[in-house]
Each structure stands twice: as C-alpha cells, then as structure tokens.
Image: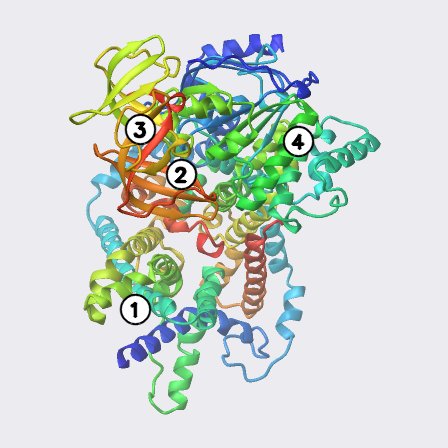
C-alpha cells in the first residue's frame, strides 16, 4: 500500500491534461488514430508536399492549349454530374423513404430489403447488371423489339444519361437510408397535432415533415455528392466518349503516363471540397446521424 | 451541531469493518459544477452509514470516490487508516451494489458470486463452500444454476449483495440498492439488509434519497445538499433536532412558522409570530443549532405528528399552561388515510400548517371550516435559522 | 388517395430499378449460352464448371480472400480498442478523434489510392499483398470503430466497475465481462468491414498491376475489355456471399447476451 501511495502521489503532481493523455483509454483510442495518421494522412500529405514542389506540377498549372481544355472540361463534367446525380438521388430517394414509412411493417421489410440487398452488393456487379438490362442486346431492348415497339435497339448504354442512371442506381440507397432514418424518428403525434390544427396534407408535409427530415436529406446529399465527385467505375464502364471525369484523367496520368504531378493538381480541388463538406457535415448533421448507431446495414 | 459521536451497534462489533475518513475531499465536474465540496467526515468501523440527499446533492459522487470510479480533485480518503485515492479499484477490496445490480448476465448465479473468489485464485472446493454460505445468508440456496434474467428483481438484489460480500470486504457501498423494487418488497429487503449488516459487522455506506429507508436502516445519516453535508447524526437526532430548515423539511414533513425572538432566558427562548399582536411561542433553550439574538427572524419548527388539534372554544386563545404552544387556526382540508387524518390548517396569522392525528376513539375529528387550536408541547419545538 | 397510389407506384418502380441489376445477374450465371443472354434461353451449370477450372479467377478470389482476411484480422482489435477508448475515455482530443475516424470512410478512394501508389512505389511494396493489407486496414477500420462503438455505448459501464470492485484488474474485467457481452457487436463490425474490403476496387486498381489481382479488379478488367461469360458466375457467387455475410452481421448485431 505504501509503495503504491508513493507512486501515485507523483501521478497526482502531473497536470490533469497530461494524465488524461496517458490513461489507458486514451492510449487505446490514439493507437488506432496513430495507425490512420501513419497510413492515411501521411501518404496523402507526403504526396501533396513532394509533388507541389516538382516541375511537373508547375507545368500542369501553367499548361495551355488542348490539355488544359481537356482538364477543365473534365472538371465541369465531374461537378455537373455530381450535382445532377445528387439532385436525382434526393428526389427519388425521398419518394422511396416517404413511401417506406407510410406502409405497414411487413411490406416495409420486403421493400427495405430491395434497398439493402443492392447496398451490400459490389458496385461492379450492379453496373454489370445494368449493362445486361439496358445494353444494345439487353433485356429492355430485346423486349421492346420483340413487342414491335421499336425497330432499332435504343442506345442507352455508353451515353451521359447512362452515367446518370448508373450512378443514381448505385447511390440511391444512401439517400433512402438517411432520409428514412430521420422520417422514422418524427413523432407520429406531430402529424396528428398538425392536422388537428387544421393543416391539410400538403401543408403538413411542407411545414412539419420536410423540415424535420432535412438532416437526413443533408446527410444523404452530402454523402452522394462526395462519392460522385470521385466516381470512376460507372463513367469508365458505361459512359460515352464525352463523359470523361476527373477520376479517369487522374487514373490515366498516374498509371499510364506516370505523370503524378498532373494527377495531383487534378485531385487537389477534390480534396479541398471533400474536406470542406466533411466539416460542414460534422457540424450540422453529425457523424452518428449519417451512419446511424442502431442497425448494421445503415452503417455503410 | 449537537450530534454526539455514536458507537456502532454493540452487537455488530465483530471487528470486521473498517472506518472511513474523508479529509477535505473535493470533486469538480468541469469548471462549474462542484459535486463534492471540501468534505470532511468520519465513518466508524462497522457502522451502517447513510448518505441521504436529493438528486444532485453529491451523494453518489461521494460513493464513486470511495469505490474508485472517480478521483477526488483535492483531499484524501482513508479506509482503515490507509489512504486509498491512488489505489486502483481492483485493489481496494470494497463491495459495491449498484441500483441496477450490475449482475453479469452471461454468468449463472453461482458464477456471479464466485467471480471475486475466482479472481483471488481460491481453490474450487473453497469457492463452492463460500458461495453456498453467502447464498444461504441471503436465503437463495438452490438458485446456483439460474441466470440473472431468470430470477425476480428482489432476488437479483440479494444476489448482487451476496456477490458483494462474498470476498469478505470490510467495506460495502450501496447505491440506492432498493430503488428499483416496489414498496412492499422494499420494506422486506430493508429488514433483511439490517440483519445482514448486524451478522457481518462490516462497514456499510448506503446512498438513498428515501428518508424513510435511511431512518429505518442507518446507525447514522449524513444529510447532503449541493455537495456539502448539512447534518450528521442518528436518525432520531436528524429527525427531531434538525440543524436547519433544509434538513427539517427533507426528513419528513416539517411545519416552519416564521417568528421573531422576543426574550431569552435560561429555560427557553420566547418567540412572537408575525402579525399584530403576535402569538407567543416557546422553544426550549437547548433546541437550536443556532444561538439567536434578540429581535432576530427565525423559524419555529414542529412536526405535524406533534400537533394536536382541539376545538376552539374550551381554552380560547391564550398563552396556555407554559408547557404547550398554542395557535388558533382554521381547518382548510382534512384527508383521511386509513390510520390517520391529515389536516391542512391556516393559523389566524396566515401560516399554513400540517397536523396529523391518529384515528382513535374519543378523539375529536374536524372538517374544513372548523375553528381549532393547534397545540403542541414546547419540548418538540425547534429553533431554526431563517 | 389518388396521390398516395401514384406515390406508391413511383416508389416501387424506383425500388425495382435499384434492385433489378442484382436479380438479373443470378439467372444469367446459369445460362447455357456464351455472352450476355438475358433472359437465358437454356440453362446449365456449364459456367460454374468452367469457373472452377479457370485458375485466373480462382487466383484472384484467393488473393482477395487472403488480403481481406489479414486486413480485418489486424483492423478488428485495433478498431475495437479505438472504439472502447472513444466511448469510455475522457481525454484530450476525444471529440476530434470521433470525427477523424470517419474521414477515411467519406474520403474519395481515388485520392487515397493515388497517395498509396505514390507511397508504395517509394517504399517498394507496390503490387504486393502487404500493400493491399495495409490499405485495407485503413478502409475497414472506420466501419469496425463505428459498429463496435455503438455496442460499447449501449453497454452498462457499471458491469465493468463491479468486476473491478470485485478484484478484477482492467484486463480481467475486459476479457471476463466486457468481451463476452459485446463480442457479437465486434463480430458484426468485422463482417461488415470484410464485405467492404472484399468488394473494394479503386485502391486495388491503383496499387496493383500484375502480381496481385484481386477479384474486383479482375471483374472490372473483364467488364472493361470484353465481357467474360464467367463474370456472371463470379457475380452470382459474390452476391450470395455478400448477402450471407450481411445477414450474419445483422444477426450478430441483434444478439443480446442474456
């Protein structure tokens, strides 16, 4: 007892902040964080640091002519696509989520599994499925031709619209889940109260439902937008020749041409936008909200 | 404070318990909240000591400081003369019973109770014997193979207690251990706990916000408010001689009559109630935690059970016989509760008082609107600072 | 009323649109024909037979399984410890870490893949299993932390305090009380992280070339260049695999130990 007392009195003399840093839980939490710093933060910072000073980097910034045009177009394309996909996802996702909370528990489970099953399946497989369905010789075209509705197969794949369709298809579950979570959290009594105060269906939605579900809308929107900015698979596999996005140019520069500097210049704006959205998201929506702390499925 | 030091119950003096001393203990949460404020206190070995107070009074914080779940910012806690604030929880050898019992749901009753023994590397046969012993002590023999979810709330409570005493700690902490039980069961469990404490002779620090429970169980009670101790004493002392109006009203009903000191003498203090002319109230001279100066505003406290109501007409308002205080009043309401009637009365000077009278043959009963005289012996009046 | 029916039909159409690609792939894998043939005109197990003879596909599957397994093996204790620290601890920087741990999850894998390509070329682990494992620990960690933290948050801390008051030191209390009561949450986290990591494509595209081809990379290449008839088999296999694992994770997430 005496020995431990002596040891402890030296602990007591240390400042509280220092003591809290060395506590067991702090060590546990920081060891995980340290791993992320070493293998996540450092590689990214190192890449930026090293290449910001390189000649390649300077060249890309001052580049003129065709390459510059291509890059700028890719940027416009990427942000435009991300914005359109986000809006489409929000509209379609909201409709589905709203419908999900309005049906009974049994139907809800079945419909929910239609959202969750794709959610757990690899994006490549889903894109593959889309090609099978909508391709030149795909299910939809064959059916329409057989039915005599069209003569020539519709060209759906390998167009800009295919990219929208593919990305919405892949990203929709995020919005459905986030909006569903916030819609479900609304107290049913509120609707009754609103109606008893004389609000009609549309007004209840506008004045009660929509404002209360906004956190889910923001969360879903931000997630979809961030993922869309870095989208590579869908545009590469089913996009048309005009649908070059930043990701593809980055990919070609880094792996085919070995021009890291160019790749990094292109990636820098994405980093800035992502971090900014992350901060906004953290402050106004909250991380827990996005990932839900209850079910497993909602955590993807 | 007039609380005299009290020897623990002589029957409990088996020497197993250890005393607990708090020396200037302070615990803050953040910069604003002082949960425990420079607390000094000595709990005798073998004593059943209760920390009583409303929620947020710091009683649970104090318990967690002894347990080791929290560290004091200042001061030292000694158990059996040894400072413990820097000893890790698992080396303190303190039994703990939480309000939710904290039984390990994945272990049988046997394994729950054997847990502290297994940790201490006791031999298997010895563990078995000891578990049987404590289960017998809490009258749950035969429950060894059940899981906590398969027994009732009262049984869970007893299992938690059995587990806490299994390794024979000299000190047991209990945080509202009966709080989750219904009233009838609670009274039963109180008796059991009291008996258990006597047979073990350990020191118990018990936290509750239920004053009845505190008075039934404890050797001594510390009444807490805002991280400070308002009064320490036997249940009788804190009930009959509360140190201040907070203690008086926290422990049962208390009538507080605002008054002014008009005369002091050897055999008592004379007060005058508010209003003109003020009624005279007498208070015995040793019945105050304060020394009141002349003309000072004070409270005269009297318990509702002590007030006797009589019809207004026979005695008439007056100073009485010198042995009783008398106040003319009107009955506002009367509530019947089986064994007693509870009256709400308003004195002619505007104070609202409660009076409780047992239902007995020959005792007068009153209805709302009746004029009455509230009458109580001078010795049951207490002088409290206002 | 009409509004509601219209909304319902619209919602169901959207739902079918989300789910259809998954259900299209399954029958295709039983098709007797080569190439895309949907709905199949005749069914056989030919594609499955071919798959088990295709070493390239089997190698890719093996690489993915190995890499994901080791990554999760390391990420699980690391993430569980981190979650415990974040939930139980009161220390400097806790709030910051709470948000920081989510960052790899929302950060574009495109950028992370690029950074790793850059790093791995310098330290000589480009196109190696080690490189994949290191990357996938980072990818899996946030999922494990989030899911296990949720479990620890709902875990009654007084159980730990009681264990310690009964003489158990921190480790004993963790292994005898905390872990037996939270393992299912940890398992759920590990499984979810495994699915995510197993399906990861972009980072693998950046940091591997020839030596170590993971299953998603092989699938991507097959789709990008020409559609290999075996793709449907692989896809079906992965769909079933993911759904079983996800179901298992959901099951574990609901286990309560009483």
In the rendered image, which residue does mark 4 sit on?
B195
Evaluate whether residue C130 shows in this view. Answer: no
The percent coordinates of residue C93 (x first, y second) are 39, 29
The percent coordinates of residue A231 (x first, y second) are 36, 55
Instruction: Tell me the distance, in whole angstroms, between the alpha carbons under discs 4 and 2.
Output: 31 Å
In the rendered image, which residue does mark 2 sit on?
B356
Q: Is residue B22 left or right of residue C178?
A: left
SS assignment at label 2: strand
Q: Residue at x 27, y 32 (%)?
A: B316
Same-chain status of marks 1 and 2: no
Q: Quadrant of the N terminus of chain B?
A: top left
**Chain to which mark 1 belongs:** A
Q: Is residue C72 left or right of residue A257?
A: right
In the rendered image, which residue does mark 3 sit on?
B326
Evaluate whether residue C34 shows in this view. Answer: yes
Same-chain status of marks 4 and 2: yes
């Amino acid at each position: 007892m005496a020995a431990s007392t002596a040891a402890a009195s030296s602990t007591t003399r240390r400042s509280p902040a220092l003591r809290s840093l060395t506590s067991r839980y702090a060590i546990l939490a920081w060891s995980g964080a340290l791993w992320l710093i070493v293998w996540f933060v450092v590689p990214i910072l190192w890449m930026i640091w090293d290449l910001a000073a390189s000649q390649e980097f300077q060249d890309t910034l001052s580049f003129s002519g065709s390459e510059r045009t291509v890059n700028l177009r890719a940027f416009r394309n990427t942000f435009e696509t991300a914005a359109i996909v986000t809006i489409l996802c929000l509209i379609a996702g909201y409709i589905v989520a709203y419908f999900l909370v309005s049906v009974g528990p049994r139907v809800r489970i079945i419909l929910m599994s239609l959202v969750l099953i794709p959610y757990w399946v690899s994006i490549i497989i889903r894109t593959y499925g889309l090609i099978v369905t909508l391709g030149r010789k795909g299910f939809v075209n064959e059916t329409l031709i057989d039915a005599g509705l069209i003569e020539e197969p519709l060209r759906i794949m390998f167009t800009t619209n295919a990219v929208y369709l593919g990305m919405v298809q892949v990203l929709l579950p995020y919005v459905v889940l986030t909006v569903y979570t916030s819609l479900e959290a609304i107290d049913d009594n509120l609707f009754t109260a609103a109606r008893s105060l004389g609000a009609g269906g549309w007004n209840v939605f506008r004045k009660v439902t929509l404002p209360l579900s906004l956190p889910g809308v923001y969360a879903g929107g931000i997630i979809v937008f961030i993922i869309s900015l870095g989208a590579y698979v869908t545009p590469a596999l089913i996009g048309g020749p005009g649908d070059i996005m930043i990701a593809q140019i980055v990919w070609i520069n880094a792996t085919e041409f070995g021009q890291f500097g160019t790749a990094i210049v292109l990636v820098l704006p994405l980093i800035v936008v992502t971090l900014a959205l992350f901060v906004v998201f953290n402050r106004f929506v909250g991380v827990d909200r996005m990932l839900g702390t209850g079910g497993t499925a909602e955590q993807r | 404070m007039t609380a005299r030091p009290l020897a623990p119950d002589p029957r409990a003096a088996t020497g197993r318990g250890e005393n607990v001393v708090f020396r200037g203990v302070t615990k803050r949460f953040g910069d604003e909240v002082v949960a425990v404020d420079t607390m000094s206190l000595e709990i005798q070995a073998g004593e059943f000591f209760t920390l009583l107070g409303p929620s947020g009074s710091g009683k649970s914080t104090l318990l967690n400081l002894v347990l080791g779940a929290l560290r004091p910012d200042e001061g030292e806690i000694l158990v059996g003369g040894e400072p413990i604030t820097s000893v890790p929880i698992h080396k303190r050898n303190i039994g703990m019973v939480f309000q939710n019992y904290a039984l390990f749901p994945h272990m049988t009753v046997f394994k729950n109770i054997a847990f502290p023994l297994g940790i201490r590397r006791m031999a298997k046969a010895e563990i078995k014997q000891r578990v049987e012993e404590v289960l017998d002590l809490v009258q749950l023999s035969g429950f060894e193979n059940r899981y906590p979810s398969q027994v009732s709330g009262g049984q869970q409570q007893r299992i938690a207690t059995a587990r806490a005493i299994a390794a024979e700690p000299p000190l047991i902490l209990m945080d509202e251990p009966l709080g989750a039980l219904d009233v009838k069961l609670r009274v039963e469990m109180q008796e059991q706990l009291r008996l258990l404490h006597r047979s073990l002779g350990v020191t118990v620090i018990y936290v509750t916000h239920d004053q009845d429970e505190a008075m039934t169980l404890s050797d001594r009670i510390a009444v807490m408010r805002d991280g400070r101790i308002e009064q320490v004493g036997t249940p009788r002392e804190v009930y009959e001689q509360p140190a201040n109006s907070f203690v008086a009203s926290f422990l049962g009903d208390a009538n507080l009559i605002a008054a002014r000191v008009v005369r002091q003498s050897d055999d008592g203090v004379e007060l005058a109630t508010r209003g003109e002319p003020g009624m005279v109230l007498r208070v015995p001279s040793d019945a105050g935690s304060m020394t009141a100066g002349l003309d000072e505003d004070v409270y005269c406290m009297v318990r509702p059970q002590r007030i006797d109501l009589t019809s207004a007409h026979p005695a008439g308002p007056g100073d009485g016989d010198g042995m009783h205080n008398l106040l003319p009043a009107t009955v506002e309401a009367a509530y019947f509760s089986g064994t007693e009637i509870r009256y709400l009365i308003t004195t002619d000077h505007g104070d609202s008082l409660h009076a409780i009278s047992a239902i007995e043959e020959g005792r007068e009963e009153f209805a709302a609107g009746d004029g009455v005289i509230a009458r109580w012996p001078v010795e049951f009046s207490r002088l409290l600072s206002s | 009323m009409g509004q509601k029916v219209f909304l319902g039909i619209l919602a169901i159409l959207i739902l079918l649109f989300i789910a259809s690609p998954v259900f299209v792939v399954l029958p295709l894998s039983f098709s007797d024909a080569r190439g895309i043939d949907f709905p199949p005109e005749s069914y056989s197990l030919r594609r499955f037979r071919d798959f088990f003879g295709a070493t390239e596909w089997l190698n890719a599957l093996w690489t993915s399984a190995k890499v994901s397994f080791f990554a999760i093996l390391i990420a699980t204790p690391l993430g569980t410890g981190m979650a415990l620290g974040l939930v139980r601890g009161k220390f400097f920087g806790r709030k910051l870490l709470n948000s920081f741990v989510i960052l790899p999850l929302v950060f574009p894998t495109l950028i992370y893949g690029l950074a790793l390509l850059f790093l791995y070329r310098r330290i000589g682990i480009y196109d190696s299993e080690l490189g994949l494992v290191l990357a996938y620990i980072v990818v899996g960690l946030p999922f494990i932390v989030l899911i296990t933290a949720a479990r620890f948050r709902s875990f009654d801390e007084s159980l730990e305090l009681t264990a310690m008051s009964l003489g158990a030191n921190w480790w004993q209390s963790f292994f005898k009380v905390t872990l037996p009561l939270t393992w299912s949450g940890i398992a759920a986290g590990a499984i979810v992280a495994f699915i995510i990591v197993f399906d990861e494509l972009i980072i693998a595209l950046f940091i591997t070339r020839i030596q170590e081809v993971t299953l998603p990379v092989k699938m991507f290449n097959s789709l990008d260049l020409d559609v290999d008839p075996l793709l449907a088999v692989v896809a079906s296999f992965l769909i079933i695999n993911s759904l079983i694992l996800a179901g298992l994770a959901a099951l574990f997430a609901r286990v309560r130990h009483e």
